Image: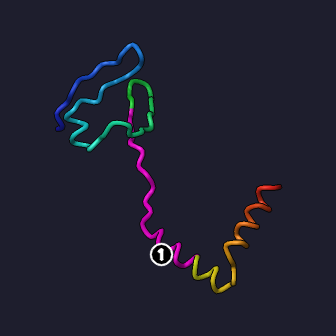
Amino acid sequence: MEKMEVTSLSSRGQIVIPQGVRDKLHLHEGEKFIVIGEQDTIVLKKLEAPSFKGFDQLLQKTRAFAKKKGITSADVDEAIKEVRSR
């Protein structure tokens, strides 16, 4: 069983996550969490940035497609202007 630690709620609704837990979970200042509360239980889930694995490959495929179809940067800019004007 994990070692339990105790913390308390401040008058401003803040809770300190004990240093040992922060170290174990590699938590750092400024990280964001989802908070779920149900009856007498509170769950914090760390929000993680989405993975960009494979993004470079997708970008290369997109550029190759645009080149094959003869789509230019000017075409893209014009399409963006048209959509934004609606």
Q: Position of residue 67 (x, y in %)?
A: 63, 83
- Using the rendered view, name the quadrant where residue 43 is placed: top left
Q: Position of residue 19 (x, y in %)?
A: 22, 32
Q: Which residues are magenta?
A: 43-62
Residue 25 belongs to the span the image colors magenta = no
Seen at 18% across and 37% down, the residue is 2
Front-most of residues 83 and 36:
83
- In this rendering, position of residue 4 left or right of residue 66: left
Residue 57 belongs to the span the image colors magenta = yes
The crowding category of the residue bearing disc 1, from other C-alpha atoms within 10 Å (few below 14, some 14 to 19, many at least 20), is: few
Extreme-right residue of the structure: 86
In the image, what residue type sits under mark 1? Answer: Gln
Seen at 47% across and 71% down, the residue is 56
Residue at the disc numbered 1: 57
- In this rendering, position of residue 78 left or right of residue 37: right
Q: How did the renderer colour the structure?
A: rainbow
